Amino acid sequence: MTGQFDDTPGNLSNDLLTRGDMISLGDKWLAFDAVNLAGVLKLGAAFLLFLIVLFMPAPDGLSPEGQKALAVMTLAVVLWATEALPISVTGMIGVLLLVVLGAVPGILEGLYGFSQPVSYFLIGILTIGLAVHQSGLAERMATFLIRGAVGKPALLYIQMLFSFALLTFALPSASTRGAIMVHIYAQVLERWNIPQEHRYYKALMLALGCLNRLGSTALLAGGITPVVASALLGDFSWTGWFLLMSIPFYANLIIGGSLLFLMYRDGFRLPVDRNAERLQSGPMSAVEYKAGIIVMITALLWFTDFAHGLHPAVPALIAMTLILTPRIGILTWQTFERNLGWTNFFVIATSLSLAHTLVTTGAAAWLSEALVGGTAFVQDSPMMVLGVLCLFAAFTRLLMPNIAGYLSLSIPVAMASGGALGLDPLVCGMAVVVVGDSLVYYSAAGTASIFIFQLANLRNPEIFRFAVVMTVVAIAVVFLVAVPYWTLVGHPLTR
């Protein structure tokens, strides 16, 4: 009869299954609702701070346009820090608010970052990295570096540290390089029967996640960090950037790698099969040869910029054109569109617009005066002032996982603050780059390597512990290595 409950075994089973599905769906709905609530709270907090800064009584020395720019930057910083919205969406919201609120005279000024060559330089080097990856050349190079260390854990680790610097010339992006290398190293560790919880496994993956990026930032073509930083610090040639940044970043890489080895040294004493099957690679393909030739031509143009004077974006765009040209190139336009990672382009362009507005409206100068006022007790000591700026950089990096957002805020403030106290603004700006880009305090802060932490099942306490060590290392390198070296090459701390 219709409407009666049928208690036959089959129907009863179906009824219970339906109820179980409903319970499961209810649990998923609760979890989804909790995630939604957390996202709403993050957005609410960000916009509340935005409104507070926007409508608070104007502080002395801060123009109305500067206050609006500061409010927009506050919103962007909080959204970047919490990642409540996709980081590229946050940047676009910031640019739109600059225009709508009148912080900039018009849309052209709001889109300042999109008009800068550095944004297109980034597109060029991302295309090079994609081509090297797609061709198989990057994996061949990584395999070659690893192959000779089979059966020798310490040598494998040392080779990996050197590869962070060497592979950057062919594969600038730390995230792309890490995505390729992590699977090769995981394959070696699997053949050696080393589990994830082993300390040797953790040491290699921490190095990949936290130190790999240092090799990239030493080069102007090394990804979003040097591209954004160089645009904010001033106009740099490829060789000019390498001259100033290679020594401090390679020092951080060597010292950090050595300390990581000491922290996990007991994990390096492990028996492995020295006759383990070696990683093999076949003969080079035609597309690999093409990728290698294009990389060498581009690198040659970068290395000789002192002779031809071309902006670094020009060789990158030449390489991009060669890579995408039918029959002689490597990538189809469809592959380029689908795999480039356009988020990086929007993040760098919008962060440059926000930082530029902070400077032109006087908001950066006002922030720097506030910082200077808080450091009045050390203003007679240039090294103490630099120390305060380095601590400011480390604290800001702790709060801001997005490196472009960190650079957009910290570089203008550090340069203005240092300049107001008689320090060379460029040295102050470079110091906060060295400190900030050397630190990954938790997995979400390593946006270029979060997939490595997840694959290796590394927990935040382990990541944070090594980050504390790297904080000390980075600040020590600034004082003991970078400042004396920059003085030798014509950039003393005091003017």
Image (cartoon, helix red, strand yellow):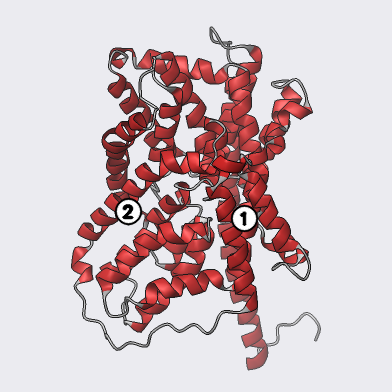
Amino acid type at mark 2: Pro
Q: Left or right of 109: which side holds 27?
A: left
- Foreground residue among 337 and 14: 337
Q: Left or right of 183: which side holds 86?
A: right
Amino acid type at mark 1: Leu
Between tags 2 and 1, which lies in front?
Answer: 1
Label 2 element class: helix
The residue most toward the bottom is 9
> Label 1 neighbourhood size at 10 Å, few (<14), some (14-19), many (20+)?
many
* Upstream in sequence: badge 2 or badge 1: 1
Q: Position of residue 486 (x, y in %)?
A: 36, 32
Residue at 59 percent of width and 32 percent of height: 75
Residue at 24 percent of width and 54 percent of height: 259
The residue most toward the top is 60
Q: Position of residue 422 (x, y in %)?
A: 39, 15
- Whether residue 379 is visible, yes or no, is yes
Residue at 55 percent of width and 47 percent of height: 304
Q: Position of residue 39 (x, y in %)?
A: 58, 46
Residue at 56 percent of width and 58 percent of height: 31
Mark 2 lies on residue: 461
Mark 1 lies on residue: 126
